[in-house]
Amino acid sequence: MKALRLRLAVSLIVLLVVLAYALPNIPAIGNSPLGALMQDRISLGLDLKGGMNLTLGVDVKKAVQNTLSVTGQDIRDRAEQEKITVMKPRLNADGLLEVTLPRTDQAGAFDAMIGKWFPNIHQVSAESSASGRVYTFELSDQARKQTEDMTMDQVVRTIRNRIDQFGVAEPDIRKQSDNQVQVQLPGMTDAERAIQIIGQTAHLEFHIVRDDVDPTSIMLPAGAARYPLIVKGQYGDQTESTIICDTESLMGGEDITNARPAFNEFGQAYVALEFNNRGANNFERITGEHIKKRMAIVLDGKVYSAPVIQDRIAGGKASITGNFTTEEAQDLAIVLRAGSLPTPVSVLEERTVGPSLGKESINSGIKASLVGAAAVVLVMPLYYGLSGLIADIMLCFTITILLAGMTLFGATLTLPGIAGIVLTIGMSVDANVLIFERIREELKSGMSAMKAVNAGFSRASISIIDSNLTTLITAAILYQFGTGPVRGFAVTLSLGILASMFTAVFVSRAVFETWVSRSSSQKISI
């Protein structure tokens, strides 16, 4: 009797909790003052809610070139430590790394240094020229493959971070073949702003402005290049001019720890930056070495501001100005804080799914669920009597637990997920059928009603748990390796399995034992 009371108490507590989470998902209750007390709702997927579907192309070739460029700087630094003279490394027209060794007598030491410290590059050629010995390097096959894989992973991670800060619920972001990334944004309506945030590379660099070079000059000195200078007017109008800067950046934005929109004393928006310890030390050193020179802040190859360095800047803080609107400063802070993309991405395909399609899918899914549930509710009492009526009540309990679980865990309901709910209805009743048939067999063998109930639940429960565990393992595999809609099906199926096992094995047994213990008759309507 003590165990029965415990089962009833647990069942009642679970019922009250799941009702609190499940009822607000019903429109009639969710839109009422009672539903307003519970803010959580089941999130709808792209196929139900509508939204945006983007296919992005990732320029992995540019990422490989960036890796080669960084390797060139490392070669130069290592050569300085080993007293080997090298000219500034550069990428040639084919995207390969060229390193010039002016003193050919140091060729042996240079080769030894490359072999010891830079196993990720492969020497393509080494030719003599008037300026010395010119080496050409490319990434090794293994390093190239690793760079491409890391680039794709970083693109997915960075885009996810940006979207999370943008506030989109349950986005689906995944790698595809041919260096592509699929992005699904349920409920997204501002397509232009979403594309700008997702696709902006946000590659931040600091360059010294070459004020000694005329921007209109046809020929530029070595180490200088033209950059577009973005000039914004007071009323949001934007123009472009040209500014000359050193091609070599002094530092990048990889050491940024925080970026936020802020306002100056005139109410103009700007982006405040904070660096980590390494970035703060580098920024302090750079500003100290270039006092009274202009430092260009270059974002994605465009100069947004070029202030004069008045003094050494310590404390690891900087700012990006440029007559930004509040929204522009907010978006720029988002992409900088979430991290820069390692390489440019382009929008290959953009599709918008209208909510009307989702509404039709929801209505069709609800209709299918209701038809299936109605068929079960009618058949079970006809075949199993009052026991069938208890099975119908357990079915309602199972669906309630399923809806509450999806709400509690923030699961997304997709069209295949609705199919999972329909399948749960059948699985829930199947467990009750196994138990009822076992109880019938025990009653036919001459057992009393209470013993038949206990034996029926004990023996059938083992089969129910075993069969459901195998299905649960399959659902876990679908969730791990499936795409967004398939994952939605796996989530609802998993929650449905757990809910049906709980109601069939635990709650239903408590109801039957209560019924039999309080009945004066030793017969069960089954």
Image (tube, rainbow, N blue to C red):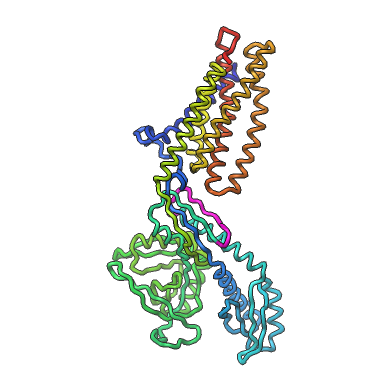
Q: Nearer the viewer, residue 420 or 93?
A: 420
263 w.r.t. 480: above or below: below
Q: Left of 18 or right of it: where is 270?
A: left
Residue 484 as seen in the image, left or right of residue 307: right
Residue lying furthest bottom: 130
User: What's the residue at 34%, 65% (across, down)?
Assistant: 324
The image position of residue 160, as x and y in percent, is: 50, 55
Query: Is 421 placed above or below 177 here?
Result: above
Quadrant of image for the C terminus: top right
Instruction: Return the residue found at the far top.
Output: 520
Foreground residue, 121 or 524?
Answer: 524
Q: Nearer the viewer, residue 190 or 71?
A: 190
The reply to whether residue 441 is visible in this rendering is yes
**What residue is rendered at 47% in x and 57% in y?**
54
Residue 254, image x and y in percent?
A: 52, 66
Residue furthest to the left: 235
Position of residue 302 in the picture relative to residue 112 (left or right) = left
Q: Provide the residue span drawn in magenta.
A: 165-179
Q: Position of residue 61 (x, y in %)?
A: 56, 70
Answer whether residue 156 is magenta in the image.
no
Q: Indicate the quadrant containing the N terminus: top left, top right, bottom left or bottom right.
A: top right
Relative image position of residue 418 (x, y in whole percent):
50, 38
Asked if the magenta segment contains residue 176, the reply would be: yes
Q: Residue at x 46, y 76 (%)?
A: 207
Q: Picture quarter containing residue 106?
A: bottom right
How many labels sit on residues? 0
Q: Is residue 90 visible?
A: no
